[in-house]
Amino acid sequence: MSSCIDVQYVTKSYGKTVALNDVSFSIPCGERYALLGPNGAGKSTTLRLLVGLLKPDTGTIKIDGHEPFSAQAKSILGYLPEDASPYRTLSVRENLEYIAALRKVSDVKGVTDRFLDWLSLREYERAKVGKLSRGNMQKLSIALALIHSPKIVLLDEPLNYLDIPTQENVFKMLKSMDSTQIVSTHIMSIATRLTDKVLMIARGRIVWNGTIDALKAMEVGDESIESVVARLMTDAR
Ligand SMILES: Nc1ncnc2c1ncn2[C@@H]1O[C@H](COP(=O)(O)OP(=O)(O)OP(=O)(O)O)[C@@H](O)[C@H]1O
Ligand SMILES: [Mg+2]
């Protein structure tokens, strides 16, 4: 199986803060991974490196064999940043149609209509983004990340702010896609709904790369999976 995401010996610092320290992992094409880790662990930094917004200090990253900042990688990546903000002076529909056109989607109007319905944004299609509620802005940001059916999907805490029906729609949407996916989250139940594969970072290092079943096997007595995860994260200190 070929790797769609390959990270080898990557270190990244911001000034004196070492955000990632000698991180290596590889994700086969078509696999879906949850990215877990405590606050400040390096999750968002990892995703920013994968989309080429940051360059590693040392080490290499390949996206389907390409450099992350190359045109080839950009065309197959869909990325939701943790502080996603669409164009505030454009309407919801204008944002979708503009990004779809930039992404060279063939049926711009059809795809826009589909996302408006999937994410229950139809009633806001003419509203300016600056006037949307935080949750509706998050729905639009998710749509903008996925509108070109990217081969590789990187979502930084996508379910933040979303109501429960929309969370369910996003689960369905992600599970129906055959893309390679990394989804960062703090909520274990979100991870288990999405996938069985977990990558866990703590203090800039990978502390777990494996299945949720294997994590469950580490439960002691009636310990919860959250407690096992907390233990792994804390042991890394
Ligand atoms: N732009 C920046 N400038 C300086 N330091 C930064 C910057 N972005 C992140 N850091 C630092 O790098 C480390 C990793 O941060 P990162 O945002 O990747 O963590 P995270 O796992 O996404 O955390 P959270 O769960 O809080 O979103 C932290 O120590 C953070 O303070
Ligand atoms: Mg983050």
Image: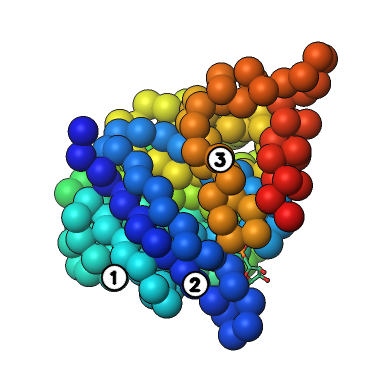
In terms of depth relative to the viewer, which is nearer, 208 or 190? Answer: 208
Query: Which is nearer the N-term, disc 3 or disc 1?
Result: 1
Name the side, left or right, on which 91 lies relative to 168.
left
What residue is shown at x 49% (from left), y 32% (from top)?
Answer: 210
Q: Is mark 3 within 8 Å of ligand 1?
A: no
Q: Quadrant of residue 35?
A: top right
In which quadrant will I find the C terminus? bottom right
Q: Position of residue 41 (x, y in %)?
A: 64, 58
Query: Label 2 neighbourhood size at 10 Å, few (<14), some (14-19), many (20+)?
Result: many
Q: Residue at x 67, y 23 (%)?
A: 218
Residue 229 left/right relative to 36: right
**Helix, strand or loop for disc 3:** strand
- Mark 2 / mark 1, whichever is N-terminal: 2
How far across and down, in percent of the image, does residue 221 sit? 81, 14
Check disc 2 and report the residue beneath it.
12
> Looking at the picture, which amino acid does disc 3 mark?
Trp
Name the residue at 30% across, 34% down.
Answer: 30
Q: Nearer the viewer, residue 89 or 34?
A: 34
What is the basis of the colouring in this image? rainbow
Q: Is mark 1 within 8 Å of ligand 1?
A: no
> Residue under circle 1?
69
In the depicted view, which residue is nearer to us: 172 or 62?
A: 62
Which residue type does callout 1 highlight? Phe
Q: Residue 31, how many percent across, how many down?
A: 35, 33
In the rendered image, which residue does mark 3 sit on?
208
Residue 115 appears in view = no
Vertical side of 95 occupied by 151: above or below = above
Secondary structure, mark 1, is loop
Work out which quarter of the rendered image holds the N terminus and state it: top left
Q: Is residue 217 left or right of residue 147?
A: right
Q: Residue at x 56, y 56 (%)?
A: 205
Asked if marks 3 and 1 touch (Cβ < 8 Å), the reply is no
